[in-house]
Image: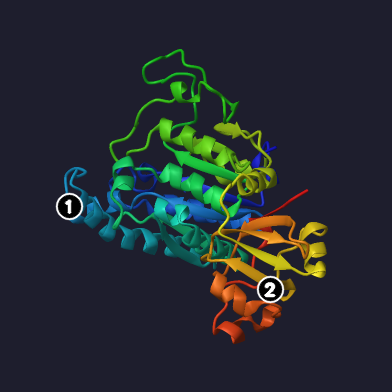
Amino acid sequence: MSIQNLSQAKLIVVKVGSSLVTAEGKGIDQAALNRWATQIAELKAKGTNVIFVSSGAIAEGIKRLGWAKRPTAINELQAAAAVGQMGIAQAYEYAFAYHQIHTAQVLLTHEDLSNRTRYLNARSTLLTLVEKGIVPIINENDTVTTDEIKLGDNDTLGALVTNLVDADALVILTDQSGLYDSDPRKNPSAQFIRQIEADHPDLESMAGGAGSSVGTGGMYTKVTAAKRAALSGASTVIASGREPNVLVRLQQGESIGTLFTSAHSRVAARKQWLLGHVQLAGKITVDSGAERAVAEKHASLLSVGCVAVEGHFHRGELVAVVNPEGREIARGLINYSSEETAKLLQTDSEHIAAQLGYAHEDELIHRDNMAVRR
């Protein structure tokens, strides 16, 4: 089951919309960014790490270029994103530097998260940054994408990142207070929803259209992002980004905005996804020691315990792990290609770099990316 409030969260993804970042398109709201940086510094001090997904590059670029309104031509949107991204990155770096926190800019597209090799690379990078105490600032790579710009889908990107890093929760900060059972701008008697299951069948019908001329995502994209985040067991909170000290208060367990809960276990959902795949790219045979480590202790698969490899596969593809008798004991996403794996058989992890000239990871398959057969 998902967490019921953010006081339980160790890692959260926070997504902030364009209207909040750019003061409704007037330019970067440095004071707002400073407030979020202060709140995130307090969260980190209390043991909650944060990955930040920020919109605003296109809106900031439009302002810097002196355009009166948002263009519709893709090439002009891409140009605006390229110009605005410089300002966004600089503003966040300035805000967090006051708290002696380093930031890292990470530009992603939906394709990065659907390609298995790039998926593993992105996951490894983000988790390493978090481990080092760095706050990743993620934006969609609008300078090279097309469909994503037209969708204005950073809400979905926030959910995908939540799934990617197995975060406990997704927080979507917007210019609205949360979800109502109907559009409050059209229905004065609309009722505010404090908590709801993310797979509730009426969610989409409750959500309205876009509410701002600056961004392109409305409540609909936010509730669908909550549904997507719930697939990996994460809760989602949709709340007003103008609520004072909103992140700290959420972390303290206060009920703000709308909480979308998930019926899925984080671990079970990921393992089920792995076990549900029909096609396998290859097979790795392990010795009895590795079998015990994987099957009984649920440890990562290390190259030292692997004795044979079959099939042709690339980094990030799904492979089976079989015991000396040929029975499948697990399956997971491999960190090395079949050619690289063949060179690493019965090699200690500390010698991977010497054997290959580089090292992606210490494990052939990390336990977080592996499902054990019962």
Q: Nearer the viewer, residue 210 or 21?
A: 210
Give the label on residue 66, or none: 1
Which of marks 1 and 2 precedes in the sequence? 1
Percent from the top left, x then y, of residue 124? Answer: 56, 64
Q: Nearer the viewer, residue 17 or 296?
A: 296
Q: Residue at x 78, y 62 (%)?
A: 325
Instruction: Calculate the distance from the C-alpha at mark 2 to the C-alpha at mark 1.
Output: 56 Å
Q: Residue at x 71, y 78 (%)?
A: 346
Q: Label 2 belongs to which residue?
A: 303
Q: Quadrant of the N terminus?
A: top right
Given the current orientation, which residue lies at the most extreme bottom position?
354
Percent from the top left, x then y, of residue 133? Answer: 59, 65
Q: Residue at x 61, y 51 (%)?
A: 166
Q: Secondary structure at mark 2?
A: helix
Percent from the top left, x then y, of residue 329? Answer: 74, 56
Percent from the top left, x then y, of residue 237? Answer: 56, 37
Q: Is residue 281 left or right of residue 23?
A: right
Q: Is residue 222 left or right of residue 149?
A: right
Q: Place residue 92 in its image quadrant.
A: bottom left
**Residue 363 shows in the view:** no
* Residue type highlighted by circle 2: Ser
When the figure is inspected, residue 35 is found, relative to residue 356, above or below; the finding is: above
Q: Nearer the viewer, residue 348 or 247?
A: 348
